[in-house]
């Protein structure tokens, strides 16, 4: 599939999502926050769900968290327009609570199609929720991070959410820089720090997949 074909397919999917009423989150949203960025990206970033600013603007990762994310991307030679950014759910959960299982189930087809269409080399998950969900593990982000996991024919790198670094932790920021360095290494085809002894639940996530039957949240 060419980049223009990917872009057209993503735009059609976004139009469908904009009218979605499959879960209760549709009742309180201002905008559906579908995704943003390069449809042919090597890196796809997945967060949890939109916050207030994202809901107001219809774009993922705007405001302070987005600014820090752009800074960290710049440090590994990437700009925001070069990557693709999405969330597990496309509408803001009230009071920024975690998405509920039925909301994830209603929305998972959109993320699955985004992954299939963009077909990135590496997925970067931000924070505990998206990392644990996509890796199907109860292991926390502090232990999960620092590694590139083989995942559905590509690699997944978990890291902290930028909001955690903005709360004032210099350690979190430095560890995010380490994780973004791993992303750069995956993109370049060089994987220092890649280990095969990660958490069992995460390692079991990467069977030889049938791309047409990819189910992120079984």
Image (cartoon, rainbow, N blue to C red):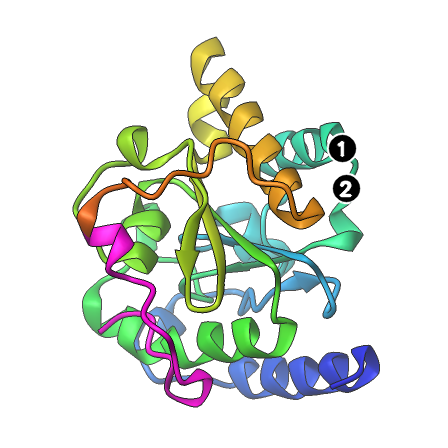
Up the image or down, 193 lies above or below 14; here it is above
Query: Where is residue 23, by image quadrant?
Result: bottom left
In whole angstroms, how far apart are the C-alphas of marks 1 and 2? 5 Å
Q: Is residue 7 left or right of residue 69?
A: right
- Along the line of sight, the residue nearer the viewer: 70 or 17: 70
Residue count near mark 2 (Cα–Cα under 10 Å), binned few <14, some 14–19, many ≥20: some
Q: Position of residue 95 (x, y in %)?
A: 32, 47
Residue count near mark 1 (Cα–Cα under 10 Å), binned few <14, some 14–19, many ≥20: few
Q: Position of residue 160 (x, y in %)?
A: 42, 33
Please name the residue shown 20% across and 41% down the image: 139
Q: Is residue 81 magenta?
A: no
Q: Which mark is residue 78?
A: 2
Q: Main secondary structure of the magenta part?
A: loop
Up the image or down, 33 lies above or below 135; here it is below
Please name the residue shown 47% across and 67% down the image: 90
Dots 1, 2 in contact, CB < 8 A? yes
Q: Which mark is residue 194?
A: none
Please name the residue shown 83% across and 82% down the image: 4
- Along the line of sight, the residue nearer the viewer: 28 or 129: 129
Q: Is residue 208 magenta?
A: yes
Q: Is residue 98 left or right of residue 174?
A: left
Q: Which residues are magenta?
A: 201-218
Residue under label 1, please give it.
Answer: 74
Q: Position of residue 79 (x, y in %)?
A: 78, 43
- Along the line of sight, the residue nearer the viewer: 3 or 50: 3
Q: Position of residue 165 (x, y in %)?
A: 48, 22
Numbered disc 2: secondary structure: loop
Please name the residue shown 69% across and 36% down the image: 73
């Amino acid at each position: 599939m060419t980049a223009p074909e990917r872009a057209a397919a993503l735009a059609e999917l976004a139009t469908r999502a904009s009218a979605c009423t499959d879960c209760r989150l549709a009742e309180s949203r201002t905008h559906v926050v579908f995704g943003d960025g390069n449809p042919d990206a090597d890196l796809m970033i997945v967060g949890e769900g939109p916050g207030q600013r994202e809901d107001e603007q219809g774009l993922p990762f705007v405001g302070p968290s987005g600014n820090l994310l752009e800074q960290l991307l710049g440090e590994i030679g990437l700009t925001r327009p070069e990557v693709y950014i999405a969330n597990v759910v496309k509408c803001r959960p009230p009071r920024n609570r975690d998405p509920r299982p039925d909301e994830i189930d209603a929305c998972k087809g959109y993320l699955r199609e985004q992954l299939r269409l963009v077909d990135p080399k590496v997925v970067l998950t931000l924070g505990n929720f998206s990392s644990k969900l996509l890796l199907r593990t109860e292991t926390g982000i502090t232990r999960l991070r620092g590694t590139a996991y083989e995942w559905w024919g590509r690699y997944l790198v978990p890291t902290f959410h930028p909001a955690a670094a903005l709360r004032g932790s210099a350690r979190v920021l430095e560890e995010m820089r380490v994780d973004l360095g791993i992303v750069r290494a995956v993109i370049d085809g060089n994987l220092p720090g890649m280990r095969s002894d990660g958490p069992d639940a995460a390692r079991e996530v990467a069977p030889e997949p049938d791309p047409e039957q990819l189910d992120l949240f079984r």
